[in-house]
Amino acid sequence: TRAMPKTIPKPDYPAEAAVRSVRQNGEIKWNGDFIYVSKTLAGEAVAATETENGQWALHFYTHPLGFIDGRHKKLVRRSALQPRPDGTAADSNSGGKL
């Protein structure tokens, strides 16, 4: 059997990251508004880091969740943006192709 830690270590987010706690309803507060992330992450800390092009990338530990769309007050999921190695994307509206 594999030994598991008794407690999971707190995430070590970069100092420049904007760390937010996910509320019980799955939202984080961002610039005075609420953005839905996931109820699964309720009570957990997530971090937003600004990218070179001015977007805010949201992460849970080292797992990228997506980008914050402040204009539409929502999280744009990473899976809809990132193409797979075969060139398809997880976008059911386009039949898998971008």
Image (cartoon, grey):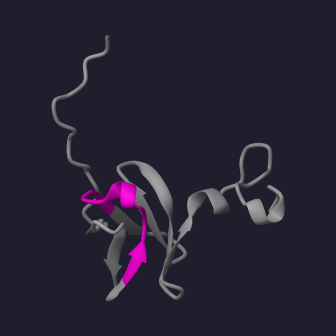
**Observer-nearest residue: 7 or 51?**
7
Place of residue 5 in the rendered image (x, y in percent of width and height, measured from the top left): 20, 28
At x 25% / y 24%, what residue is drawn? 4
Q: Is residue 48 above or below residue 11?
A: below
Quarter the C terminus occupies? bottom right
At x 40% / y 48%, what residue is drawn? 62
Q: Is residue 32 above or below residue 38?
A: below
Q: Which residues are magenta?
A: 34-46
Residue 71 inside the magenta-drawn segment:
no
**In the image, is 70 to the left or to the right of 46?**
right
At x 71% / y 47%, what residue is drawn? 84
Place of residue 93 in the rendered image (x, y in percent of width and height, measured from the top left): 78, 66
Residue with the most extreme top position: 1
Place of residue 78 in the rendered image (x, y in percent of width and height, measured from the top left): 57, 60
**In the image, is 31 to the left or to the right of 71?**
left
Quarter the N terminus occupies? top left
User: Image quarter for residue 82?
Assistant: bottom right
Residue 37 inside the magenta-drawn segment:
yes
Residue with the most extreme left position: 6
At x 55% / y 75%, what residue is drawn? 53
Q: Is residue 67 above or below residue 95?
A: below
**In the image, is 47 to the left or to the right of 10?**
right
Place of residue 44 in the rendered image (x, y in percent of width and height, measured from the top left): 27, 57
Q: State how many labels appear.
A: 0
